[in-house]
C-alpha cells in the first residue's frame, strides 16, 4: 500500500546488504490515522500522553500503540502465547487483571482473551506470557478460471483422476447446500452464539464453487456448464470440502475463530479420529484461506502464520490470498504505473506473508486470450512488511470470476448478504443458457485474490489426486517452477507483483521436480548501492535447480550467476525502506471493496 523511499543511511559499507523497508506517504498517513481513531473505538478521548510501554518487543505493533496511549476505558481482544501450562492459579491471576478467556488455542500454545486496555502492560509483564497479538477482525479478500489456469487441459489429459481422497478445508463464511456443491462432508461453526452452519454472507459458497462446483445448475440442453476448477467432468468427482465457518454475515470474524477452525483441520491432517468425520484413510488436506488482515508483526509470532505452519508441518498444503491492496491510490493518474493507480509495495496480507504457504495474486482477463491476461491492479504486492519475504508466490485467475451463488440459507430462509447488497453481481442466465426457460439465479460474480486462491487450491487437489505422496514443499516448488513466466504490460519483470508467474496446472502436473527441503519463499536484501537481491541458496529447495531465472523468469534476474533483481533500483529506489506507521485497521475476513464487487 505504500511506496518506497529513495533515502539511504549514511556511513554504510558498500558491500552491506540490509533488509528493505517501506516509506511513509503523507496522504496514507492521514488516512491511516483516521482509521486508527475508529480502531480505538472512541476511547482515544480518554487517552493520556504516550509513554514507554511494557509491551515493546513482546507484542505486535497494534497492541504496542494501544498500550502506549494509556487508555483508561475499553478492552481489547488479545491472543496470548503462554510459555508454561496455564494452571488454575495463573488463570486466577489473569482474571485479577480483568482478563476473560474466551478461546483456547493449543495449536499455537495460546489463549484468546478480552483484556482491559488499562491492563495490557501488566498482562505483558507476567513472566509466563511470551507474546501478545491483537485478535483482529479479519476480512475476506475476493469461466475464465479453468481455461486460463490450464486446468481444463489437465483434466483432458487425466480424465480418470479421482480427487475424492483430498479434503479442502474452506475457512470462510460457511458453505450453503446448493445444487452445484454437494460434496461438503463436514460443516462446523467456530463463531460464538452462531449455530447457523450455512453461509449467511455468500463468500464461502462462492469460494467452494471455484474449487469443486459441479455445474449442476448449468448442465443440459442449451447450457454452457459453469464448473469449479477441481471438478472432474469425466468421472463426476470433485475434492471433498469441509465448511469451517469463522466469518459472519458481513464477511468478518476474529483471528482466534479462524485459528480454532485450523486447529480442527490439523486433527484431520493427523488422521485423528476426534475430528469426528469419516474420510478415506489416506486423505490429504488442503487449507484455503481467502481471508486476511494487514501485517502487524513478524510471521514468526503472528498467530495465523504460526497455525498455518503447524498445518504445513503436518502435511497439509496451505493456500492464501495475497490481499487486494496493490493500488497506491483509488483514482487514476496517467503519470503513475499500474494502469494509473500507482503500485503499493509491501501490502501482502497475513497469513500470506508466511514463507511456507502458497500466496496467490489475481489476474484479469482482457480479451479472452490467456496470453493477453494482466495482473489486476488491486492485487497486493510484496515484499512482505517487516520480514521482507518475496511474495506473492504465484498468480491465478481472480477477476470477475463466475461461481456459485449461495441461494437461500436453509436456517435463516434468507438470501446471502452479498446477494442482497449487490444483486447486480448475479449472473444473467443468458451468459450460460440459450433456451427459453426462466431460471432461478444460481451464479454470482466476484473479483479479488480471494477468488484466485481457490483456483490454486483446486490445482493442488488435482496434483494430489495424481500423486498422493507429494509433500507440500514439492507441490509449491512444482507450481512455481512450472508457472508461465509473466511480465507487466511494458515487458518488464516484477517478481514482487507477479511472483513466479501465471499458474499452469497442466505443467505442474507434468513436473517431476522433488523438493528435499522446505520450499520457503526467500527474503529480499538491499546493498548500499540500492541494488535488491533475492536471498536464496542457488540449490533451490533441494530440487537440483540452480538458476533463479527458472523460477522468476529470465527478465527478473540480472545475469546468469547472480541473484540480483533486474531494474531493482528503478523500482524501489536506492535507499533502505523505513518501517511504515502502524496500519490503523482491525478488519480481518473478506474484502468487499469496490474492486472486489465490480472487478476491473
Image: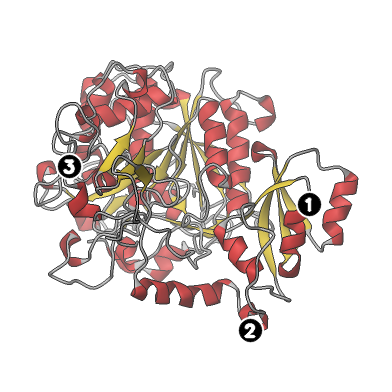
Residue 73 in the figure: left or right of residue 69 = right
Residue at the image point whose x is 76% and y is 65% from the top: 119
- Lower sequence index among marks 3 and 1: 1
Identify which residue, 18 or 586, lies in the foreground: 18
Name the element at disc 2.
helix
Which numbered disc covers residue 45? Answer: 2
- Lower sequence index among marks 1 and 2: 2
Expressed as whole percent of the image width and height from the top left, the position of residue 535 reads 34, 34
- Asked if marks 1 and 2 touch (Cβ < 8 Å), the reply is no
Which numbered disc covers residue 566? Answer: 3
- Lower sequence index among marks 3 and 2: 2
Query: Which numbered disc, 3 or 2, marks the residue closer to the eye?
Result: 3
Expressed as whole percent of the image width and height from the top left, the position of residue 209 reads 38, 44
Q: Quadrant of residue 150?
A: top left
Quadrant in which the C terminus is drawn: bottom left
> Which residue was labeled with disc 1?
126
Identify which residue, 342 or 53, lies in the foreground: 53
Amino acid at each position: 500500500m505504500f511506496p518506497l523511499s529513495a533515502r539511504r543511511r549514511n556511513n554504510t559499507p558498500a558491500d552491506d546488504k540490509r533488509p528493505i523497508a517501506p516509506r511513509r506517504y503523507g496522504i496514507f498517513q492521514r488516512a491511516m490515522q483516521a482509521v486508527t481513531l475508529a480502531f480505538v473505538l472512541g476511547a482515544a478521548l480518554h487517552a493520556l500522553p504516550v509513554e514507554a510501554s511494557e509491551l515493546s518487543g513482546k507484542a505486535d505493533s497494534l497492541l504496542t500503540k494501544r498500550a502506549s496511549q494509556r487508555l483508561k476505558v475499553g478492552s481489547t481482544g488479545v491472543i496470548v502465547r503462554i510459555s508454561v501450562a496455564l494452571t488454575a492459579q495463573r488463570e486466577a491471576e489473569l482474571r485479577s487483571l480483568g482478563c476473560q478467556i474466551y478461546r483456547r488455542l493449543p495449536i499455537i500454545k495460546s489463549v484468546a482473551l478480552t483484556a482491559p486496555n488499562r491492563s495490557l502492560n501488566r498482562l505483558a509483564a507476567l513472566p509466563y506470557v511470551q507474546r501478545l497479538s491483537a485478535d483482529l477482525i479479519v476480512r475476506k479478500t475476493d469461466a475464465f478460471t479453468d481455461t486460463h489456469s490450464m486446468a481444463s487441459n489437465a483434466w483432458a489429459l487425466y480424465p480418470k483422476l479421482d480427487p475424492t481422497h483430498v479434503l479442502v478445508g474452506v475457512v470462510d463464511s460457511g458453505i450453503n447446500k446448493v445444487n452445484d456443491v454437494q460434496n461438503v462432508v463436514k460443516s462446523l461453526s467456530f463463531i460464538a452464539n452462531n449455530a447457523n452452519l450455512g453461509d449467511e454472507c455468500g463468500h464461502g459458497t462462492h469460494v467452494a464453487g471455484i474449487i469443486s462446483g459441479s455445474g449442476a445448475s448449468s448442465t443440459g440442453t442449451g447450457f454452457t456448464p459453469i464448473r469449479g476448477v477441481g471438478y472432474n467432468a469425466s468421472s463426476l468427482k470433485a475434492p471433498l470440502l469441509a465448511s469451517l465457518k469463522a466469518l459472519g454475515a458481513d464477511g468478518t470474524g476474529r483471528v482466534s475463530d479462524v485459528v480454532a477452525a485450523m486447529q480442527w483441520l490439523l486433527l484431520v491432517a493427523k488422521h485423528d479420529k476426534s475430528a469426528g468425520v469419516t474420510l478415506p484413510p489416506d486423505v490429504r488436506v488442503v487449507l484455503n484461506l481467502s481471508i486476511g488482515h494487514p501485517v502487524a508483526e513478524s510471521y514468526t509470532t503472528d498467530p495465523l502464520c504460526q497455525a498455518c505452519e503447524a498445518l504445513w508441518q503436518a502435511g497439509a498444503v496451505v493456500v492464501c490470498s495475497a490481499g487486494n491492496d496493490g493500488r497506491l491510490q483509488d483514482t487514476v493518474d496517467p503519470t503513475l504505473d499500474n494502469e494509473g493507480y500507482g503500485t503499493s509495495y509491501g501490502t501482502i496480507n497475513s497469513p500470506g506473508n508466511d514463507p511456507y504457504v502458497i500466496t496467490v495474486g489475481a489476474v484479469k482477463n482482457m480479451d479472452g486470450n490467456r496470453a493477453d491476461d494482466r495482473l489486476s491492479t488491486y492485487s497486493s504486492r510484496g515484499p512482505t512488511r517487516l520480514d521482507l519475504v518475496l511474495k506473492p508466490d504465484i498468480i491465478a485467475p481472480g477477476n470477475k470470476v463466475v461461481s456459485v451463488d449461495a441461494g437461500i440459507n436453509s436456517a435463516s430462509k434468507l438470501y446471502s448478504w452479498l446477494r442482497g447488497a449487490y444483486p447486480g453481481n448475479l449472473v444473467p442466465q443468458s451468459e450460460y443458457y440459450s433456451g427459453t426457460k426462466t431460471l432461478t439465479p444460481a451464479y454470482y460474480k466476484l473479483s479479488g485474490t480471494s477468488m484466485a486462491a481457490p483456483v490454486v487450491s483446486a490445482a493442488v487437489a488435482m496434483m494430489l489426486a495424481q500423486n498422493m505422496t507429494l509433500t507440500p514443499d514439492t507441490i509449491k516448488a512444482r507450481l512455481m517452477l512450472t508457472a508461465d513466466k509473466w511480465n507487466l504490460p511494458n515487458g518488464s519483470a516484477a517478481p514482487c507483483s507477479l511472483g513466479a508467474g501465471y499458474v499452469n496446472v497442466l505443467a505442474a502436473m507434468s513436473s517431476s521436480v522433488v523438493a528435499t527441503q522446505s520450499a520457503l519463499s526467500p527474503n529480499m536484501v538491499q546493498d548500499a548501492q540500492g541494488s535488491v537481491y533475492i536471498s536464496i541458496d542457488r540449490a533451490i529447495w533441494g530440487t537440483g535447480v540452480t538458476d533463479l531465472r527458472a523460477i522468476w523468469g529470465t527478465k527478473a534476474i540480472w545475469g546468469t550467476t547472480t541473484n540480483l533483481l533486474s531494474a531493482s533500483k528503478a523500482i524501489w529506489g536506492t535507499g533502505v525502506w523505513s518501517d511504515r506507521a502502524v496500519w490503523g485497521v482491525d478488519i480481518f475476513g473478506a474484502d468487499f471493496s469496490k474492486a472486489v464487487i465490480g472487478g476491473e
